[in-house]
Image: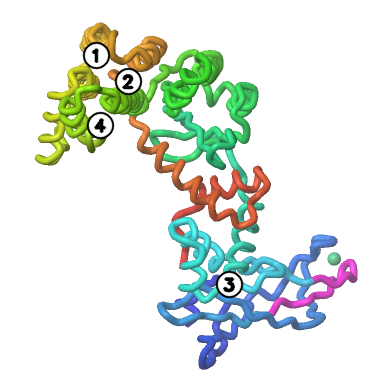
Amino acid sequence: MTDILNLPGFMVKEYRFIEGVGLVLYLENLTTVVTCPHCGAITDKLHQNYELTIRDISWGEQEIYLRVNRRQMRCECCGKKFREELELVNKRRSYTERFKNQIIQEVIESDLKNVAQRNNVSEQEIETMLKDVVKELKIQKPSNLRKLGIDEIALVKGQGNYYVVLVDIEKGILVGLVEQRTEQSVTNYLSSWGQEVLNKIKEVSIDEVNAALGACIRENVDLWKPYKKIAAKLMPQAVIVADRFQVMKQVNQELDSQRKKSKREAHNLEDEAEKAQVLSGLNKSKYPLLKNEFELTLEQKDKLEQVKKVDPILAVMHSLKEQFRNIFEVSANWVEGLLSLGDWLRDAQDYSPQSIGTIRRWVGEIIAYFDCRTTQGTVEGINNKIKLIKRRGYGFRNFDNFSKRCFLTWLFPVSFTS
Ligand SMILES: [Zn+2]
């Protein structure tokens, strides 16, 4: 049993099975001498015994409790009394460190409520464990960061409250979380990594920027292009890449606005027969128009044909949208990409003025995409996890603690001795 327990320095003296509780192991501490924390002398003078019962990792379905003596010693050198430190258990906690680590790992991978139920631990206890670990967590500068992803997440929808998320795209881990979406805060955060870290960054991939730009186009112009500026200032050696899916989104948005406009106009038609025909053609046309054409069902393809027949503008815009996606999928290199994009910009001139504006401003970054083909899937995944942590809250209201709680998900050791 001592071997199974695998706690160096302890021996299982005896065990008892307690119905409804689990298996209780009585341990003997094989280390007899203790170092005095006051003067550093070594002593083996026992003053008092102090028996603890602590939870340990389960053996299969069997819950395990350890009965262990945390001795109170008396130092022969300085005469002071002190309680010995046990490595396996944190002071004032009723479970072993390795039990805590196992629970934390499970919480990171699943849901706190489930973990509590499965392990027969209270949710509050798990929150305490999380807080303990977060307190000890030391966030280090990213090492060997070559591809930096920048993204934002909205905390409370519609309140304009955003965090800036920094990601190591190659490793798929969070490397930074900035509380405020201002040029100054992001600059300060990145600068704190130091030039040595920043110099290694070869590529900066900026997401959401086009969504933000979309908002800017609606409200004002280029309100939020600081990311590009920050990257150019702090990492002049890095290539800046825009996410093509975001650009694609805008092309789609414009197509959708046209669809709505066409519908409104159809309602105003005076010829009743014509009005009925156009409206029936446009009815339920959103997905057939917006979805990738190769992914349409037969029924949707049919619908698409009807739309094209009744609305020539939508027909052109749909084909432009398909061409646009195609450029990103088939261009073998940036020269080819740029040539095709040039053609597209010319063809789209009368149809998609907003997308053209965005593309013109970001042409360098979009071209870089053809060379690097960085996708933002990693960043999305990380964002979703952060949102989940935020939604659950668990008392991490203070930003520093919340940020550490997020880091825990990617920095916590994956394997334990058990
Ligand atoms: Zn002493």
In front: 1, or 292?
A: 292
The amino acid pointed to by label 3 is Ser
In front: 294, or 149?
A: 294
Ranked by sequence position, the earlier of labels 3 and 1 is: 3
Image: 256 above or below 65: above
SS of the residue at dot 1? helix
SS of the residue at dot 3? loop
> How far apart are the two marked residues, 4 and 2, measured between alpha carbons?
23 Å
Q: Which residue position is annotated with label 1?
A: 337
Q: Can residue 98 be seen in this view?
A: yes
Q: Which residue position is annotated with label 2?
A: 369
Residue at figure coordinates x 64%, y 66% from the top left: 87
* Dot 2 crowding, Cα within 10 Å, few <14, some 14–19, many 20+: many
Q: Which residue position is annotated with label 4?
A: 290
Judge depth for marks 4 and 2 and give the one in front.
4
Q: Can residue 410 be seen in this view?
A: no
Ranked by sequence position, the earlier of labels 1 and 4 is: 4
> How far apart are the two marked residues, 2 and 1, measured between alpha carbons?
9 Å
What stretch of residues is rendered in magenta? Answer: 69-82
SS of the residue at dot 2? helix
Residue at figure coordinates x 56%, y 65% from the top left: 100
Q: Which residue position is annotated with label 3?
A: 122
Ranked by sequence position, the earlier of labels 3 and 4 is: 3
Q: Is the Cβ of the residue at disc 3 closer than 8 Å to that at disc 4?
A: no
Q: Is the Cβ of the residue at disc 2 closer than 8 Å to that at disc 1?
A: yes
The amino acid pointed to by label 4 is Leu
> How far apart are the two marked residues, 2 and 3, measured between alpha carbons?
49 Å
The quarter holding residue 370 reads top left
